[in-house]
């Protein structure tokens, strides 16, 4: 087992130059969570329009795995219909459980996080942002449902 | 290589000691294990492991119950362990030692047995910002149940307790001062006797959280004049879930039981019951018999070495670590002079998150702790979300400090 499997270049790049790391004033959905074991914190903001994740951003602090995962998340779900974003979150969790073999097409840069699976203690770091996204988007369903009535 | 004390006399033969710890032969990622996480739990010498095996192979039975030979042997061994631990902390009365799973359970025992019985609305419990969650949460729960109020002694920029603030916090409503004898993050060693004298002057009792202090320094409850001292066995070469509480006899007698069940009763009625004498009033159910016997073996291992020698050795290795960490630009938290601190050395290195740092170090065989070390309040005061901590014990060497520094440099290259 080599550290290069974990700290791939693309992960370090997202960590040092995070994408969409900012607050999002127009976001009607947001969720914050921290990992009480290590103190990592992530807030995800999402703006949903016409059933699509029109914009998404995050703020937070923590290790390279939690922060790069959040950065990649924003790139991966931006512009996607909400159900597809939730589907990707489920697949990402599946990859971390070693149950889903990721395709480059669906996962893009996120494939780089596959190496985390070999370091079980760090899986919670990688999954944190996705938990937060899922909780934030859960509000989108309610918003849509109440709009339909 | 023997440590040379300030007097110039070799006090501790670390190479010989290292041979007593089987786990130190392990290799991690094909490198020698450099174990710098003894503040989380210490490694165990062969003598402790053998004592547990011997107990299970030759003496195992439940204590204080049956009259057969094994039960008698097990009971004698268990009670001998109690006497051993009492003597180790300076008490000549074995009944002042209650066995339980260690410091967390010991604080909870005092919080329930003493706090819930004697604290009233508006009474004050004085803690410090240094405290481990195990010396905060039980008091929060008691405060919520009784209406008592928590007060926190602030920590200065140098990582010491602000004693002027302590004096001004200590009013007539103060009923208990619960303070760490050695910080698990900063190593800070508050002046415990002064604190106890001041607390007693206003009628407050004193609990010393000895989780780090007892394993790393000579401790005598008569000198400290503390009312309660919590003791962790697994941090002082003993098995996990060993250790317990020292308390002055009159407090144990006045306290209510914590856990109810078998063995802690004298006579059981349908609605009420009476309790056994101390310390058994606090030992419900089958106890950690093998673990406490293992702890006695740990004390027997430490006795000929002596805690003065352990402390002198740790001062040498940890001071070397602090100096080298400063050299490579790490920010070391807490006092920098080992004469006023223990060997728990927390630091921040080049903005590399502690989790990443500890992952890279592990690849080099170096085991440190990363995170908030169960001290979220202190980390908020320090202004960092987490720290890396290297902690040292009698089996660590200056060479291992060099391995730590070399591994840090590697992490610096990776994340630079």
Image (tube, rainbow, N blue to C red):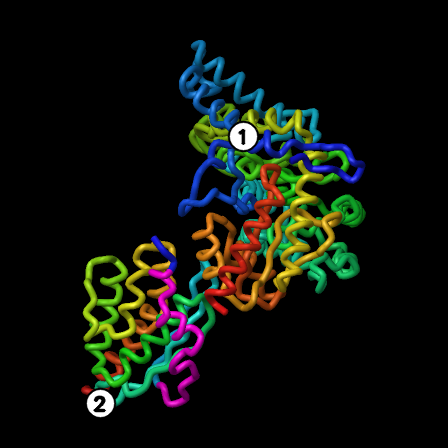
Q: Nearer the viewer, residue B386 or A35?
A: B386
Share a chain, discs 2 and 1?
Answer: no
A20 in magenta? yes
What is the secondary structure assignment of the residue under circle 1? helix
Give the side of residue B213 with respect to residue A115, left or right.
right
Q: Which residue is mark 1?
A: B19
Q: Nearer the viewer, residue B129 or B313?
A: B313
Q: Which residue is mark 2?
A: A50
The image quadrant that residue B106 belongs to is top right
Q: Nearer the viewer, residue A48 or B22?
A: B22
Magenta stretch in the rendered image: A4-27
Estimate the spatial distance between the alpha carbons at disc 2 and disc 1, rounded to whole Å.
69 Å
Give the side of residue B136 with respect to residue B28, left or right.
right
Disc 2 sits on a residue from what chain? A
- The mark closer to the camera, 2 or 1, is 1
Disc 1 sits on a residue from what chain? B
What is the secondary structure assignment of the residue under circle 2? loop
């Amino acid at each position: 087992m080599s550290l290069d499997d974990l700290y791939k270049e693309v992960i370090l790049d997202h960590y040092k130059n995070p994408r969409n790391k900012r607050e999002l004033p127009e976001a009607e959905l947001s969720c914050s969570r921290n990992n009480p074991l290590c103190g990592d914190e992530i807030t995800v903001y999402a703006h949903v329009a016409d059933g699509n994740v029109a914009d998404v951003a995050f703020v937070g602090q923590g290790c390279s795995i939690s922060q790069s995962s959040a950065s990649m998340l924003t790139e991966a779900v931006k512009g996607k219909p909400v159900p597809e974003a939730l589907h990707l979150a489920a697949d990402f969790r599946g990859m971390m459980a070693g149950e889903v073999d990721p395709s480059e097409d669906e996962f893009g840069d996120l494939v780089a996080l596959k190496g985390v699976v070999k370091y079980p203690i760090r899986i919670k770091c990688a999954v944190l942002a996705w938990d937060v996204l899922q909780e934030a988007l859960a509000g989108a369903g309610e918003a849509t449902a109440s709009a339909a009535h | 290589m023997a440590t040379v004390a300030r007097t110039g006399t070799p006090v501790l033969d670390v190479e010989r000691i290292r041979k007593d710890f089987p786990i130190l032969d392990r290799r991690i990622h094909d490198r020698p294990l450099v174990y710098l996480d003894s503040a989380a739990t210490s490694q165990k010498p062969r003598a402790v492991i053998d004592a547990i095996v011997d107990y299970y192979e030759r003496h195992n039975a439940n204590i204080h119950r049956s009259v057969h030979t094994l039960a008698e042997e097990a009971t004698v061994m268990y009670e001998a362990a109690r006497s051993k631990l009492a003597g180790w902390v300076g008490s000549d009365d074995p009944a002042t030692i209650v066995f339980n799973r260690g410091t967390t359970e010991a604080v909870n025992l005092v919080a329930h047995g003493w706090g819930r019985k004697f604290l009233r609305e508006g009474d004050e419990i004085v803690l410090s910002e240094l405290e481990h969650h195990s010396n905060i949460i039980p008091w929060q729960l008691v405060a919520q149940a009784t209406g008592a109020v928590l007060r926190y002694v602030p920590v200065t920029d140098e990582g010491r307790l602000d004693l002027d603030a302590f004096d001004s916090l200590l009013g007539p409503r103060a009923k208990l001062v619960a303070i760490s004898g050695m910080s698990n993050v900063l190593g800070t060693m508050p002046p415990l006797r002064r604190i106890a004298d001041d607390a007693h002057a206003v009628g407050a009792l004193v609990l010393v959280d000895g989780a780090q202090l007892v394993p790393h320094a000579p401790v005598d409850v008569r000198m400290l004049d503390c009312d309660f001292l919590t003791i962790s066995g697994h941090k002082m070469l003993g098995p996990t879930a060993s250790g317990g509480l020292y308390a002055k006899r009159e407090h144990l007698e006045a306290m209510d039981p914590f856990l109810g069940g078998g063995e802690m009763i004298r006579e059981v009625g349908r609605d009420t019951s009476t309790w056994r004498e101390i310390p058994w009033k606090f030992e419900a159910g089958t106890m950690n018999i093998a673990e406490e016997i293992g702890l006695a073996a740990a004390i027997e291992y430490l006795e000929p070495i002596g805690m003065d020698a352990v402390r002198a050795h740790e001062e040498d290795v940890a001071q070397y670590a602090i100096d080298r960490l400063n050299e490579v630009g790490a920010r070391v938290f807490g006092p920098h002079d080992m004469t006023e601190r223990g060997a728990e050395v927390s630091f921040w290195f080049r903005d590399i998150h502690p989790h990443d740092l500890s992952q890279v170090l592990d690849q080099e065989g170096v085991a440190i702790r990363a995170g908030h070390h169960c001290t979220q309040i202190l980390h908020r005061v320090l202004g960092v979300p987490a720290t890396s901590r290297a902690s040292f014990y009698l089996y660590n060497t200056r060479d291992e400090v060099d391995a730590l520094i070399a591994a840090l440099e590697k992490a610096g290259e990776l994340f630079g």
